[in-house]
Amino acid sequence: MTQAGLPVPPGLIVTTEVCNAYYANNKQFPEGMWEQVTAALQEIEKKVGKKFGDAKNPLLVSVRSGAAFSMPGMMDTVLNLGLNEETVTGLAEQTGDLRFALDAYRRFASLFGEIVIGVAHEKFERVMDRFKAHSGGERLDTDLKPDELRGIIAAEKEIILAEQHTIPDDPYEQLRVAIGAVFNSWMGRRAIDYRRINRIPDDLGTAVNVQAMVFGNMGKNSGTGVAFTRNPSTGKKELYGEYLLNAQGEDVVAGTRTPNPISQLKRELPKVYEQFNAITQLLEKHYGDMQDCEFTIERGKLWMLQTRTGKRTGAASVRIAVDMASEKLIDRATAVQRVTPEHLDQLLHPTVDPKTDARVLATGLPASPGAAQGTVVFSPDEAEELAKEGAQVVLVRHETSPDDFHGMVAAQAIVTARGGMTSHAAVVARGMGKTCVSGASDLEVDYSQQQFTVKGEVITKGEWITVDGSTGRIFLGKVPTVQPSLGPDFYELMKWADGFRSLTVRANADTPHDARVARQMGAEGIGLCRTEHMFFGDKRLASMRQMILADGTGAREKALEQLLPLQRGDFVGIFREMAGFPVTIRLLDPPLHEFLPNVDELLGELSELKMALRHAGTLAAMDHLLDEIDEKRQLLHHVNKIREANPMLGFRGCRLGLLFPEVTRMQCRAIFEAACQVKGERKQVMLEIMVPLVSISEELKQQAEMIHDVARQVTGEHGMKIEYAVGTMIELPRAALTAGKIAEHADFFSFGTNDLTQTTFGLSRDDSGRFLPAYVDRKILSDDPFQVLDREGVGELVRLGTERGRIVKPNLKVGICGEHGGDPSSIAFCNEIGLNYVSCSPYRVPVARLAAAHAALDADATAAAEAAVVSAADEDAKAREAVGVAK
Ligand code: PEP
Ligand code: MG
């Protein structure tokens, strides 16, 4: 902005390299830095015609962070630095405004105390509240008289003294410790938390910006504000923001006074408004993206303090991208790249059911959209603790400060009683895609009683509330929510994204309902239908158990007879929903423990029955109980007989289908009967049958023979021809290594990266949750490998399996259907190694489509950059040749 000639207060920057040197050097400034700072400070003095520390004409500076990635509110800032008992008098004389000078001093003292010395913010807040309430009635801080301000400053100094500290009188010393404090805030808890969530590396470091102060608190023609070039909630093209007259920056974001909408500035200070509006448009055009600008007006003169790419909601992100492409500000590829997977995720969040007649408890500002519910908590620590135990909580605060960040991360939603649309709570929640209602001023929050009151009604900790961040409403209790209906911008953007990607995106769907949702989300087929999931639900589970526990083939066939029509019915529904799209049905892969009754529970039930037997009154009752006991004992016996020490590595997948061929036969019969029925309805069935947990090529060969056999039988019975493919999951290291041999019997491969991760790491899918987070915390692993594909190990097996399979069958279709199929970074890897498709849960499909487009665009950009390097080298070689220089 400075280079563009915009009005920016002069300043100096201590670079991020210094921050890293500071940490490498035991928190000492590197040699020579201080001299450079003081030299640059002299330049600032010259530009503004004031002197740092001068008793008559003092220069004041702000000291703030500046990171490569915007981390709003996560690090520390000290304003009005350079004030002491002498310079404050100078400032009063220089400005002719004693009240202003004292106000600046009391702000400096509390900020310095809080940020540099580490005194709790509340202590200073209490002083302010005490003085504001002093002469009766609620007053604003602008109402405070010079004497009262002097009292506040004295009280603030006492607080600092009580903690055995003082504010240095020497402005240079103030500056030195303040720079150190900003560096220290890079490693503060909230900054670290923010970086972890936003995947910002820890070693980037922060710069420190030291800038001449301009003052928004110099009377009615001064002020300060924040504005976005487009509405950050909806994306609408309008200047959107807030300002306060006679105030300093933190007053707007801290929510201590309720700011005015920026449109009002047009009436109050029309010239300033026009200038500001023109500058923001220039900035948006220059950066080609929506800007978030901070400004201060000092006695009618506009100063730009900051511009950065504005944080926005998912809905706004999509609208802004589509609008900007239509305005020819950016091209379509850039528009697609602008929308992040997280944004789309947010767009797909639920909203409160519009038909609800639930009572609205209170209404605040719609700070961050989405609907969420939880039990009320008032402390961020408690929010974090309860969330760790799996509870859903809503964090309710007067207003939030950056110290609340960990609680905000943990909560489902955030409610504040004070603060505007750009308050800390609103900005941070929007950035996280978390539901938030701010400024719900009817709420009287009482931390000590752990309750809030709304018009006499008391809500205490632990009660459920539902928060609608799209409308600002807060409901008592759990209110039904609905999935969002996606607007035309979303569909337009997805259409563009689909045009760029080369990966096909399918869904993992086990029921006709899932299949319908998957199509609505744009899935181009089903990549995994887990047939064992069709048996969740009481009645079905009982038949499934009977089948597993059956003693001998006869009993098993009987149980299978009951399962067949259920399976066939589901397949019919799925084929209908997916007419014209491929459907991969996986044969049964039940890790037995998921379907068997729990032994401890069975033992408990048995002892209860025995107890009941002792107290049975009649012979008939005894008989009945004895029968039941007998049944339970038999069940226990069976369960014990087939119980496995390691069910994940046990009798599952194709092992079951090979040793109990009647299971595979029943399933194939159900599949082909359903296929014949739906084809008979003149719908296109594109069937793929997939064999799970293969590690030996012979397993697939034998299962494939069985499938072909049943296919011949059923299609013969129906007099129909059904085209189908037979393929396999590659989810064990041996399968990946021997993929060449396996490919001889496979029409397609689908990588089951859940099991492949489990077996490559030798890390149980069921138990890893206990210690993997600690591995990530300690940076032993960069990510949980069950979430993000481990490229180095598991990914290498995927690459190798694909290559070996395609040596034998060059056109082998290869996809992925583990959870990684919906993870953007894993999708990029799949794109890189040339897979044909990814498959993920239905609601994740739009995210996967977008991520696949990003992957393709990134790959194009890399290829273009490489081509440019090659052609530059060629040019160079030609040039050398032309002048006869040898290589
Ligand atoms: C896998 O292992 O990645 C997979 C998709 O199968 P499941 O999760 O059903 O074991
Ligand atoms: Mg698996």
Image (cartoon, rainbow, N blue to C red):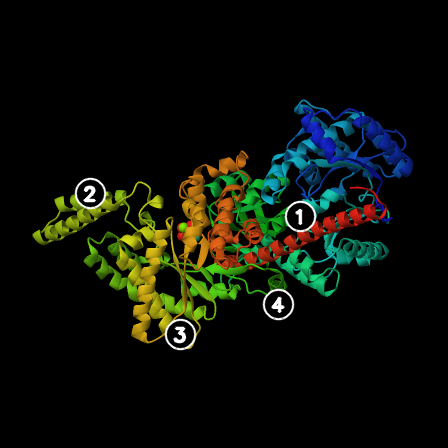
Which of pointers 4 and 1 indicates the residue nearer the eye?
A: 4
The residue where tag 3 is placed is: 679
In this picture, residue 669 sits left or right of residue 681: left
Beta carbon of the mark 2 residue lies under 8 A of ligand 1: no
Mark 4 or mark 2: which is in front? Answer: 4
Q: Mark 2 — residue?
A: 607
Instruction: Answer with left or right where residue 740 lies relative to residue 175.
Output: left
Q: Earlier in the sequence, mark 2 or mark 1?
A: 1
Question: Looking at the image, is mark 4 or mark 2 earlier in the sequence?
Answer: 4
Is disc 2 surrounded by few (<14), some (14 to 19) or many (20+) residues within 10 Å?
few
Left or right? Give the position of 555 relative to 703.
left
Disc 3 marks a residue whose amino acid type is Lys
Label 4: which secondary element: helix
Dot 2 and dot 1 residues touching (CB under 8 Å) = no
Expressed as whole percent of the image width and height from the top left, the position of residue 534 reads 36, 59
Which label's residue is closer to the chain start, 1 or 3?
1
Q: Could you tell me how far apart the alpha carbons at marks 3 and 4 are, in whole angstroms?
A: 34 Å
Q: CA distance from mark 1 to mark 3?
A: 59 Å
